[in-house]
Image: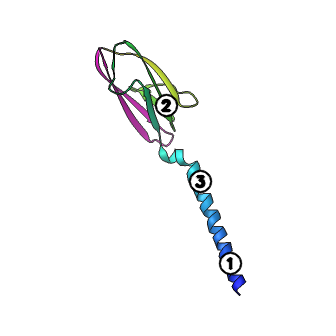
């Protein structure tokens, strides 16, 4: 009798453990879908003052289906890296990045620069 109840407890514990492992693995694999789109701007720094007319903007975007810079599509490579060159007018400029994932979720990031 004691051995039978111990076996039942072990069986239940094994089933619960197995289900828990499957659920945790599913959450781990779905982490990018849960997180949504991500934009990281590496250069130039937000709020930087630049002197060159031609600037290079570098960054990464993940979990996206498309990304735009000031409503113009930009290209990313297979690792999510983007590299854009822009002519910067004199004075204060705000650039807006917008990324959308395949589920319609969007994120916006702004980059503020001053050219002297």
Label 3 element class = helix
Left-right relation of 22 to 34: right
Q: Which residues are magenta?
A: 90-116
Disc 3: which residue: 26
Give the residue drawn at x 53%, y 47%: 31
Q: Vertical placement of 38 versus 77: above or below?
A: below
Give the residue drawn at x 58%, y 30%: 78
The answer to the question of whether label 3 and label 1 lie on touching residues, with beta carbons closer than 8 A, is no
Give the Cα distance between marks 3 and 1. 27 Å
Seen as rendered, the residue at the extreme left is 91
Give the residue drawn at x 72%, y 83%: 3
Left-right relation of 4 to 61: right
| Residue 106 picture quarter | top left
Left-right relation of 26 to 70: right
On whether residue 102 falls in the magenta region, the answer is: yes
* Relative depth, front residue between 101 and 45: 45
Disc 2: which residue: 60
In this picture the colour scheme is rainbow
Label 2 element class = strand
Residue 92, percent from left and from top:
28, 21
Q: Vertical placement of 100 versus 21: above or below?
A: above
* Crowdedness near tag 3: few (<14), some (14–19) or many (≥20) residues, C-alpha within 10 Å: few
* Relative depth, front residue between 6 and 61: 6
Q: Quadrant of the C terminus?
A: top left
Give the residue drawn at x 65%, y 76%: 9
Label 1 element class = helix
Give the Cα distance between marks 2 and 3. 26 Å
* Crowdedness near tag 2: few (<14), some (14–19) or many (≥20) residues, C-alpha within 10 Å: some
Q: What's the mark number on residue 8?
A: 1
N-terminal-most mark, 2 or 1: 1
Seen as rendered, the residue at the extreme bottom is 1
């Amino acid at each position: 009798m004691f051995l039978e109840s111990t076996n039942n407890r072990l069986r239940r514990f094994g089933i619960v453990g197995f289900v828990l492992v499957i659920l945790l693995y599913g959450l781990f694999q779905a982490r990018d879908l849960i997180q949504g789109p991500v934009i990281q701007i590496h250069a130039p720094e937000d709020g930087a003052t630049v002197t060159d007319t031609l600037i290079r903007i570098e960054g990464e975007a993940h979990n996206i289906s498309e990304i735009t810079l000031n409503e113009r599509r930009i290209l990313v490579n297979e690792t999510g890296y983007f590299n854009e060159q822009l002519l910067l007018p004199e004075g204060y400029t705000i650039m807006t990045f917008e990324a959308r994932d395949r589920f319609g979720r969007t994120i916006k990031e702004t980059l503020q620069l001053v050219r002297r």
